[in-house]
């Protein structure tokens, strides 16, 4: 970003947000107080709880907001729309300052029990340097979304130890499969919760190659769930917002990226050492990630096999998460067990308090 544009962007921030950027030392002190590698579990949701609908990423129109609100109300939740939910600035949901103000206001609100992203898109990473992480650590709440929201989920966990949730954005298609995992994870707080392939995905695999499950390397492993959208996660390499990936059960999903770009991003993760530090690799359904017809290119299965088949960790493709309607809910920071041969994931502890 050019210096002039960067300064202009900063000028849109409220004074409190600018002060938050200087709070790194206080945040570090708080992090140490909860213990190295410590975690903060947010309180479980209950029917009738108030949920904040917010949008740190792409612009949302009225139809999307209406669909998102109805989805959350169908779960028995009350919805409070963030003040700048309808803001827009180019492709993003308003200025950095507007999106940051909404995030802080919802964490500070005494009645709001969860923050649910309305949609993905792009731009979430812009707000990361300005977040008041000590505010988040003092007011732990459920934060859920996926795709571009990956950067916020990982940053909150890295900076505060807060367990965050890779799951459907509020405007997603809430299938019965998805709802069952939302209830098990966010409301019931079920430990030893096993997740397997959505029946819908098994049926679609007959005609749609990207839904075909493949074991890249057999075996099972236990570790800490970490991951999200591949391109967003790769963009966090070298920043303070990527958590410690040692002993991770690494989960990745992607949409609309050519195989050569997927290979390039995985190569970046490998050269960073991230893949060697992981205990397992869990790959969701990659959507629209095949080369154009007639293009001289690797296909997706080759790009993934090149990175994972010979690596000595359990790995499998086609798991039920990503840009699909039927999704697992994956708590970032929770210990879990992955069985590549059965393509199952079992949470070994509750993700909520």
Image (tube, rainbow, N blue to C red):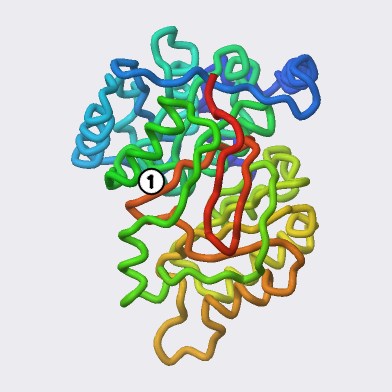
Side (left or right) of 139 relative to 76? right
Q: Which residue occupies the extreme top position in the image?
A: 110
Between 95 and 212, the one lying in front of the other is 212
Locate residue 48, reporting x and y percent.
Answer: 29, 16
| Residue 343 in sight here | yes
Image: 1 above or below 86: below
To which quarter of the image does residue 242 belong?
top right
How far across and how far down the image is residue 11, in percent? Answer: 54, 27
Depth check: give the residue in front, 50 or 191. Answer: 191
Q: Residue visible at 64% across and 58% down?
A: 281
Taking the spot 56% from the left edge, 84% from the top edge, the residue there is 298
In the rendered image, is residue 94 in sight? no
**Depicted 140 relative to depicted 90: above or below:** above
Task: Determine crowd level at label 1: few under 14, some 14-19, many 20+ residues with C-alpha closer than 10 A.
Answer: few
- Counting from the top left corner in percent of width and height, residue 138 is at 61, 12
Badge 1 is on which residue? 90
Q: Foreground: 212 or 105?
A: 212
Q: How many marks?
A: 1
Residue 182 or 170: which is nearer the viewer? 182
Left or right, 31 with respect to 179, comes to: right
**Label 1: which secondary element:** loop
């Amino acid at each position: 970003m050019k210096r002039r544009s960067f300064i202009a962007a900063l000028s849109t921030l409220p004074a409190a947000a600018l002060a938050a950027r200087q709070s790194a030392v206080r945040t570090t002190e708080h992090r140490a107080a909860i213990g190295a590698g410590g975690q903060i579990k947010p309180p479980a949701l209950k029917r009738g709880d108030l949920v904040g609908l917010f949008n740190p990423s792409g612009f949302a129109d009225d139809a999307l907001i209406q669909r998102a609100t109805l989805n959350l109300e169908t779960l028995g939740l009350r919805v409070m729309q963030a003040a700048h939910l309808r803001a827009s600035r180019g492709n993003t949901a308003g200025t950095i300052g507007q999106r940051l103000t909404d995030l802080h206001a919802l964490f500070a609100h005494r009645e709001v029990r969860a923050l649910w992203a309305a949609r993905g898109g792009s731009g979430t990473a812009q707000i990361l340097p300005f977040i008041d992480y000590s505010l988040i650590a003092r007011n732990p709440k459920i934060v859920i979304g996926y795709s571009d929201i990956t950067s916020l989920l990982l940053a909150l966990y890295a900076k505060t130890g807060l367990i965050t949730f890779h799951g459907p954005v509020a405007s997603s298609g809430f299938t019965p499969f998805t709802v069952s995992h939302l209830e098990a994870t966010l409301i019931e707080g079920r430990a030893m919760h096993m997740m397997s392939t959505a029946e819908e995905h098994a049926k679609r695999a007959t005609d749609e190659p990207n839904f075909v499950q493949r074991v890249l390397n057999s075996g099972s492993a236990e570790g800490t769930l970490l991951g999200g959208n591949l391109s967003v996660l790769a963009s966090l390499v070298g920043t303070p917002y990527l958590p410690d990936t040692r002993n991770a059960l690494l989960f990745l999903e992607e949409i609309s990226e050519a195989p050569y770009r997927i290979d390039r991003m995985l190569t970046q993760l490998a050269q960073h050492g991230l893949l060697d530090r992981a205990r397992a690799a869990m790959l969701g359904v990659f959507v629209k990630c095949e080369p154009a017809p007639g293009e001289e290119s690797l296909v997706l299965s080759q790009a993934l096999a090149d990175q994972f088949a010979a690596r000595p960790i359990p790995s499998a493709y086609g798991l039920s998460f990503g840009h699909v309607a039927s999704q697992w809910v994956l708590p970032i920071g929770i210990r879990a067990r992955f069985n590549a041969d059965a393509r199952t994931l079992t949470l070994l502890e509750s993700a909520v308090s």
